[in-house]
Amino acid sequence: MNGINAVKRHSVGRGEFDVFEDAGGEFRFRLLAPNKEIIARSEGYTTKGGCMNGIDAVKRHAPDATIEDQTTSEAPTGKFTVYEDAGGEFRFRLVAPNNEIIAVGEGYTTKGGCMNGIDAVKRYAASEEADFEVYKDAGGEFRFRLVAPNNEIIAVSEGYTTKGGCMNGIDAVKRHAPDAEIEDSTE
């Protein structure tokens, strides 16, 4: 917790933010303690303005942020929500503990098919067989799709403005899907 407390202490006042462009052309920042030790690093931003907005967000939110320790056995897990869409198909979403949608499944004609899709995501997400394909969509956003060993797409992501954000989404699927509970709103 010392690192977290250092971020809270130094994000406003005595700390220093170091902004730089990485080898991939993304802008990043580091929060440095007064002794110049790095105490936090950012994700990549496509623009310097986005990076500066990230710094402002840290300055605003870090001092009062609550600490969620996910290293304990009581760490919150994600959940799969099952629902029926307007067209009568069954779908699922993988939702992170902070209620952000991490991934969604395709439409299934039966609830059993949808439950099989969830089972496949749970089984493959964190396995060595997992195949996450990262791509850029027509709108320029990064997305991923989880492909099962039989080459079927079993889950896709929302759009991310940075590749780093997309990679974080993949990590979240790997972390949360295997133990996620299922919340069925069709019952």
Image: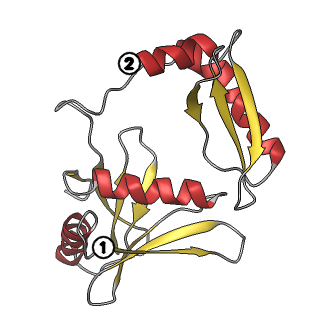
Residue 48 at x, y = what percent? 82, 45
The residue beneath circle 2 is 1
- Pick whichever, 55 or 84, lies toward us: 55
Quarter occupied by the N terminus: top left
Front position in the image: 136 or 139? 136
Q: CA distance from mark 2 to mark 1?
A: 32 Å
Q: Nearer the viewer, residue 161 or 95?
A: 161
Query: What residue sits 78% from the left and 36% below the top?
Result: 52
* SS for callout 2: loop
**Residue 156 at x, y = what percent?**
44, 70
| Residue 130 x %, y % | 30, 73
Residue 182 location in percent, x, y?
Answer: 21, 53
Q: Which mark is residue 130?
A: 1
Q: Amino acid at mark 2?
A: Met
Whether 162 is drawn above or below 138: the answer is above
In the displayed structure, 53 sits above or below 88; it is above
How packed mark 2 is, by other alpha carbons closer than 10 Å (few <14, some 14-19, many 20 or more), is: few
